[in-house]
Amino acid sequence: MSELKDKISLPFNKVKQRAVLGHILTNPSFFLQCRAQIKPNWFSEELLSAKIYKIQCEWFDRHGYAPSVEEVASCPAVMSEPIPEQTKIRNHIQLCLSEMTKFGLDAIRAELTEWLRAVVFREALETATKAYNRGLFNQVDAIFKETVRKGNDIAFEDHGEVTLNNLQLLIEKTERERGAALTTGLKIFDQALMDGATVGGLQRGDMTLILAPSNVGKTTALITIACHNVRRGKSVLLMTHEGRPDDIVRKIHQSFLGMTYPEILAAYKDPKLFAVLQQKLEFLNRFMTYIPINKPGMTVEYVESKIRRAQEARMAKKGGKGYDLVVSDYPAKLTTERAAKGNLPRREIDRIVYDYYVQLALEYNFHALTAIQTNRDGSKVNNGREERLLTKEDVSESWGPIELATNVITMNRSPLAKQMGRVTFYVDKSRSSETGTAIVCNSRYDMSLTHSEELGGIWYRGHVTMEDRVDDLLRQFGKDPDFSRREIPESLVFAS
């Protein structure tokens, strides 16, 4: 421990410090978290609270488990004290147990985490300042990188056992989660990802990975899904790591408005139509945040900090409600600070990078929508050289992201499909464990729309291509395959 940490004390008054000790005495998992991160002399009542906590730590060191209240009160370290001192210790234990009922452990955990992280950063600031004054700038950089790692390691969260016999609670929680799911924008697509989906198939806390070759339309698919959710009043954070930001903004506008660029340009020249577009884009701006991070060599740690700041700013602005969907196009463009020495293969870097999105989705309860590219053979499959759809085995050597994702969807668009204005999504991994569903969607790439309820589509089971039968299937479902002249309904364009 540093000199600074030796001087500090817990950021609570004596009453609340006793409550902390009461929780430590009665909650073994909390004790183990505190033992690794809190020193006895941080308690202001050193002759009582600090002594009792030290006795607990020494007991654990000797016996390998957290002692019970009774074991602490009657252990040799207490029994060897004079009778009056023994009485004081036991009375103080009872006082701590009483004060514990006044302060919830969840709040204490959060406060301890924030405070101890602040201590670590304060210590780093003092050390970094000294290094800076001596001109050791490389040390300053190293100090802060290590401090970020240490700060992320500080946590007092509860990782205890889960109750297995409360069926009502589980069902209610499951239904709430399903009711808060995000949408792909196409009902049959949602249902292929989540059995019985009603409002959406993308559950919060999960990560969905879209797998496709280069120049098939991954970015367009991500933007399409993002805009479908914005129309439902869901908040979206979109980050890109390649491409010109102006081009991305143009795609967003086209997808959200359901208009081609020439149509947008024509509306711009008509004051009345332009006023309508502006109103719709104001709605878009309220619910979507776009942050391009396109510099080479960017690390996932930097992107993580941007996501956290954006999320916390949104929560502060919206009364504690953060983003519902975080879209990243695409994380494989990033590296990690752990690869600074050049000793990590690309597959390990990708695993680390995509795992950050998984953990952030769980922490902030949003859905993470990401993309990754296929290998060279995947491009051959997509060009129609094999009569099958892409599967997760067609990913590049980085298998880690496939394992981490809840949903893996391949995106297929052969030369014939481009000619017919269609794209096929194949579900190769899903939350419900149901796989093998292909969704053939009518698309409008000139509007940056890969799919929508209004454009329509069909599904079938299997991973073989069915280009020669799609027209017949669409007619059976009452959809006109010649959709190129169809107007985009107002319901697609904008819903307040």
Image (cartoon, grey):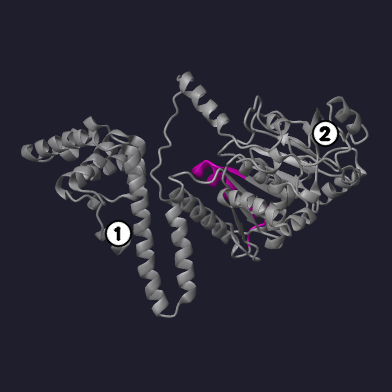
What is the magenta segment's predominant secondary structure? helix
Q: Which mark is residue 99?
A: none
Q: Is any atom of residue 79 visible in this view?
A: no
What is the quadrant of the N terminus in the image?
A: bottom left
The furthest residue to the left: 84
Q: Residue 251, percent across and down? A: 72, 54
Mark 1 falls on what kind of element? helix
Mark 2 or 1, closer to the camera: 2
* Residue at image coords 49%, 50%: 314
Lateral position of residue 172 relative to residue 11, left or right = right
Q: Please give the label number shown on residue 5.
A: 1
In the image, what residue occupies the spot 72% across and 58% down? 268
Q: Are marks 2 and 1 in contact (CB under 8 Å)?
A: no
Inter-mark Cα distance, 2 to 1: 59 Å
The answer to which of 406 and 352 lies nearer the viewer is 406
Residue under the point 51% across and 57% down: 305
Magenta residues, as a range?
A: 343-368
Residue tagged by mark 2? 463
> Could you say where residue 216 lies in the image, as x and y percent from the top left?
80, 50
Q: Is residue 452 left or right of residue 183?
A: right
Disc 2: CA contacts within 10 A as few (<14), some (14-19) or many (>=20):
some
Classify mark 1: residues with Cα within 10 Å, few (<14), some (14-19) or many (20+). some
Residue 49 sits in quarter: top left
State left or right for residue 317 relative to residue 49.
Answer: right
Q: Position of residue 15 (x, y in %)?
A: 19, 43
The C terminus appears in which quarter of the rendering? Answer: top right
Q: Secondary structure at mark 2?
A: loop
